[in-house]
Image (tube, rainbow, N blue to C red):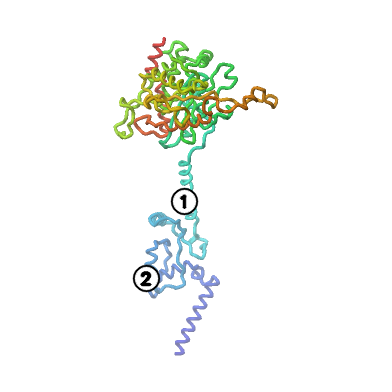
Amino acid sequence: MSEHTGSQSSSHGGDRGRRRSRRRGGGGREGRETRPRSREKDKDNSASGPSGSGPIKAPIILAKPHTEKNRDSSTSGSGSSDSKPIVLIKPREDTSSASSSQSTTSGTAAAQVAPSDGFHGDQSGRGQPTQQPTYQIQRNVSSVAAFSESSQTRLAPPPEMTQPVKLVDDSLNWCDSGIEMLLDQTDFLVVGVVGMEGVGKSTILSLLAGNHPEQSNRSFVFKPQTEETLETAGHQTVGVDLFVTSERIILIDTQPILSASVLDQLIHNDRKLPPEVGLAENWAEVLSLQLAAFLMTVCHVVVVVQDWFTDINLYRFLQTAEMLKPPTPAPSHDAPSSNVSLDTEGDYFPAVVFVQNRATREDFQPSRVQAMKTTVDRLLQHASMRYKNSVSMSLNGLMPAQQKSPSRDVSLFLFPDFPHKPAKQNGKMDGVASVLSLVPDYQGHPSPQALTDSFRNQIFSVPRTPLTHHSLTEKNWFHYAARTWEGVRKSNLMAEYSRLLT
């Protein structure tokens, strides 16, 4: 019994000595071993047998799947109870991605293993955790943030426009700057304006864009003619301008048709004329026809503005432009039949609205308005344009309702000459202006603001007939308009018509 206790005490003393030498760093290789290495040694001993008599082998792969670790821990029941689990620093991904990343990085798995107590390993670099998984997590977070930011940017509406952009420049070249203001959605309306020089086309479009009649001309979206332009008998708008409102209304302003100032520029600038056009006068007329045919192809509504009633040449010009208008593209084989709502002949024609600008007090009389409608109806009775039932002066209580049939109601709207604010001289109004300021607002017609609101609401409520056999988005419309403009410029019908003019 004493011998047995002596052997036990000696064994305990030997264990204490080995522990002290292990703490002080002595005792050969076993003293230099660290805690993670001791854990792996315990695992190897437990796997080799309960006696632990096998040789100690250095671990080859430290990173194991969780299933194998659980299996090893269940089979090594005699292992040390104070060993801490091995923690793998990995990104928070699904199981499939984590297992694939572990299988691809099995050769360098020792660099991704770190104990929970923050151990950094020995000088050989074994057991040192790397920051690659942390960097991978940051990279994933940044990519997700970038994706969400790009999606929000793509879905966000473009900035609201404050001034128009060029659609066709003074050299008759197409400009691509307007596509940045368009969206990939189909709920939009295209309104174009055509008219002779100085009739107020830009003013009418500015009212549609949201300006008020009481505002100064400088605040209008489409700048009207300035005093210098009027004195030099020039035109303000050059080429074609584009403006998109917040209600997704696309407004198109064009240079005047049959304009003497455009002809004057062609003569003085010595611009090279096409070979099929002999004279500059013919080229000015052909250019006007190209602009009108372009609007009749790409617009839902074409507003024809005139400041006196009426010019027969204007209606002949509209019928000629309708004849030279390029045909609507034929539908493809995969086009749905529900989108086809064009005329029976398959050609598209816009809704035409006539605006009588600078109308006098007598023009607002019901009998005079009815006479204007009858004249327009007789002049365009053989035209294919939809010039009826778009707008009316009888709506919103502007004028008494006529006894005419609704199917015979021509789209005609009247605007008075908007009064300008009295000018002050030396800080005081002159005598006439001060007397006119005391006169009531009613002058034989509704107020300019009431007329503007009614006209805007009726134009925006015009049925939006599809321009083609397919449903177009705003950006698709832009590309369609670009192809239409190139087709109009290179049209054989236009070339043949210009030859007949000579």
Is 433 left or right of 50, judged from the image as shown? Answer: right
Camera-nearest label, 1 or 2: 1
The x and y percentages for residue 7 are 46, 84
Separation of residues labelled 1 and 2 (CA atoms) = 38 Å
**Residue ID at (44%, 67%):** 40
Q: Is residue 146 visible?
A: yes
SS label for mark 2 = helix
Circle 2 Cα neighbour tier, 10 Å, few/some/many (<14 / 14–19 / ≥20): few
Q: Residue 379: x, y in percent?
A: 39, 17
The residue identified by callout 2 is 75
What amino acid is found at the position of numbered circle 2 in the picture? Answer: Thr
Residue 331 screen position, x and y as percent: 32, 30
Circles 1 and 2: CB atoms closer than 8 Å: no
Front in this rendered view, residue 84 or 328:
328
Q: Which residue is at the front of the view, 230 or 461?
A: 461
Give above or below for 213 relative to 155. above
The quadrant of the image that shows the C terminus is top left
Q: Which mark is residue 140?
A: 1
Mark 1 or mark 2, earlier in chain: 2
Q: Residue furthest bottom?
A: 1
Name, please, the residue furthest toward the top: 502
Q: Is residue 395 above or below residue 259?
A: below
Left or right: where 445 falls relative to 380: right
Q: Amino acid at mark 1?
A: Asn
Q: Which quadrant: the N terminus?
A: bottom left
Q: Can you say whether 445 is above or below 48 in the image?
A: above
Total marks placed: 2
Binning the other alpha carbons within 10 Å of mark 1 as few (below 14), some (14 to 19) or many (20 upward) gives some
Q: Nearer the viewer, residue 220 or 416?
A: 416
* Residue 18 placement (x, y as % from top left): 51, 75
**Secondary element type, mark 1:** helix
User: What label does residue 15 carry, if any?
Assistant: none
